[in-house]
Amino acid sequence: MAWMKSKFITLYITALVVACAYAVVNIVNGANSAHLLTWISVLIATAPHLLFFMKIFIVPTARTSSNLGTLVGLGVIGAVTAVISVLQMTSIAWLPLVCAIAIGMGGNLLYVFWYSRFGRGENQQLQVGKKLPGFVLEGQKGQQIKSAEFVGKPALIIFYRGNWCPLCMAQIKEVAGQYKAMVDRGVQVVLVSPQSHDNTESLAKKFAVPFQFLVDKDNKAAEKLNIISKNGTPAGMGVLGYDSDTVMPTVLITDAKGKIIFADLTDNYRVRPEPETFIQVLEDNGITVTDQSSAATASA
């Protein structure tokens, strides 16, 4: 099933581009009135979702609504309108009908209610109140970094899918914007991905904040923590050096003793916690600016 998702997203976006382009060509070329309404219906069903993908790649977007109600509604409206217009013709125009129903409405529904969801079960290891399980990551020079090294200071640990994921990049940008708030509370920020060291290094240079950018080689930590996403990377990303397996977006916050005080195990890659949530969790658990300042003064 996972390999089907990998291929679906690549094929779906390609199909949206083709369907929208073909509809525009037919409209511009002056299709007769009956066909004109049909091709307009195709645009109603497909163009909004194509624009949605363009937006999340161009404009930093860390999260969306769960069900994308407006897009789903437009897909249905476009498909229904296409059916009505085709029924008024003397012969059935199959191509625009397929574009509106299969690509516009059908592809839309599959993306929102099937592709976007991981189907995560309950994770017994990553529950609030439990100690962070042991795992090993790699630093930028290939050195081993054990999770035990995060103990001693509060930690915000984000497992992200890779530089190819625009929502992950937007989420990291939000966290980078919270840099001072994290430092003031003595929080170490750890960003983990199964991508290559070269991609991780380029990301670290892009944000230029003193976070730990680490690599989960061969998804060993993700597999141990039961957050691996088999074949979760879109088909075609292999040419850019990304493995087919990736990680389900996961955010953990631990206290200075290594106890998990927050765990976001989203079941939808488009639904992620607001950045203010992290600060609130720290405050609720007594990890405040005042406390950290006092501790620093006392130790001095």
Image (spheres, rainbow, N blue to C red):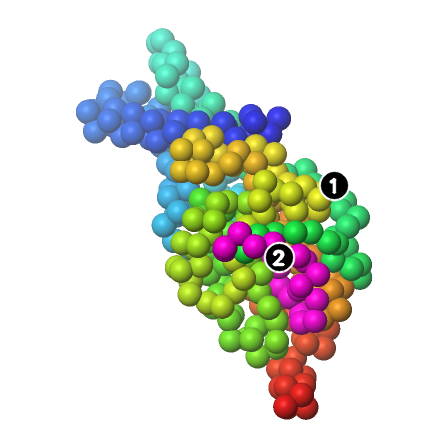
Residue 92 place in picture, x, y as percent: 38, 11
Q: Tell me what residue is drawn at x 68 percent, y 58 percent.
A: 147
Mark seen at residue 101: none
Give the residue number, with chain letter if any, for mark 2.
145
**264 to the left or right of 203:** right
Write down the region rendered in magenta: 140-160
Q: How many marks?
A: 2
Q: Amino acid at mark 1?
A: Gly
Q: Earlier in the sequence, mark 1 or mark 2?
A: 1
Residue 7 place in picture, x, y as percent: 49, 27
The residue carrying pointer 2 sits among few (fewer than 14), some (14 to 19) or many (20 or more) residues within 10 Å by Cα, namely some
Q: Tell me what residue is drawn at x 36 percent, y 50 percent.
A: 58
**197 to the left or right of 96:** right
Give the residue number, with chain letter if any, for mark 1.
121
The residue carrying pointer 1 sits among few (fewer than 14), some (14 to 19) or many (20 or more) residues within 10 Å by Cα, namely few
Q: Quadrant of residue 150?
A: bottom right
Distance CA(mark 1)–CA(mark 2): 28 Å
SS at circle 2: strand
